[in-house]
Amino acid sequence: MPVASKSMDLLNNLSEILEYCTNNGEPVIVTNNGQGRFALMTEERYKELIGKSKNELYHALQAGLDQINNGEYIEQKEMFEIMDNYLRK
């Protein structure tokens, strides 16, 4: 669970807070007047949370468009049948 830290603590204890994020893989929520305002986390953790990067997403979309343009697709009715059969297992 993320640890809440006052914005003043952030200024005074930045190195310790960053070390916590690195060692525990958890974000630290920075609060201001008792309300969460920001989350600090490692870049690795951030990428885990957001999933694929925009670049990877664009490549996946382009690959899908290329498949459609090459006739490598199935009709909607067939896809729903496949999904229905899969869900019944």
Image (spheres, grey):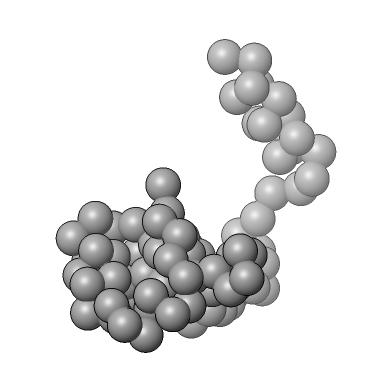
Which one is in front, 71 or 14?
A: 14
Residue 18 placement (x, y as % from top left) = 26, 74
- Give left or right: position of 3 versus 14: right
Task: Classify residue 16 by image quadrant.
Answer: bottom left
Residue for point 28% across, 65% down = 21
On screen, residue 47 above or below 59: above
Which one is in front, 5 or 37?
A: 5
- Give left or right: position of 14 versus 55: left
- Give left or right: position of 61 versus 5: right
Labels in figure, total: 0
Residue 29 placement (x, y as % from top left) = 48, 64
Residue 59 placement (x, y as % from top left) = 50, 77
Task: Classify residue 47 by image quadrant.
Answer: bottom left
Looking at this view, name the residue that lies furthest to the bottom: 11
Task: Classify residue 45 by image quadrant.
Answer: bottom left
On screen, residue 65 above or below 84: below
Which one is in front, 29 or 84?
A: 29
Residue for point 29% across, 71% down = 17
Can residue 39 be spotted in the picture? no
Residue 88 placement (x, y as % from top left) = 64, 15
Looking at this view, name the residue that lies furthest to the right: 77
Residue for point 58% across, 73% down = 32
Can residue 81 be spotted in the picture? yes
| Quadrant location of the C terminus in the rendered image | top right
On screen, residue 86 above or below 70: above
Residue for point 43% across, 66% down = 5
Which one is in front, 39 or 79?
A: 39
On screen, residue 8 above or below 19: below
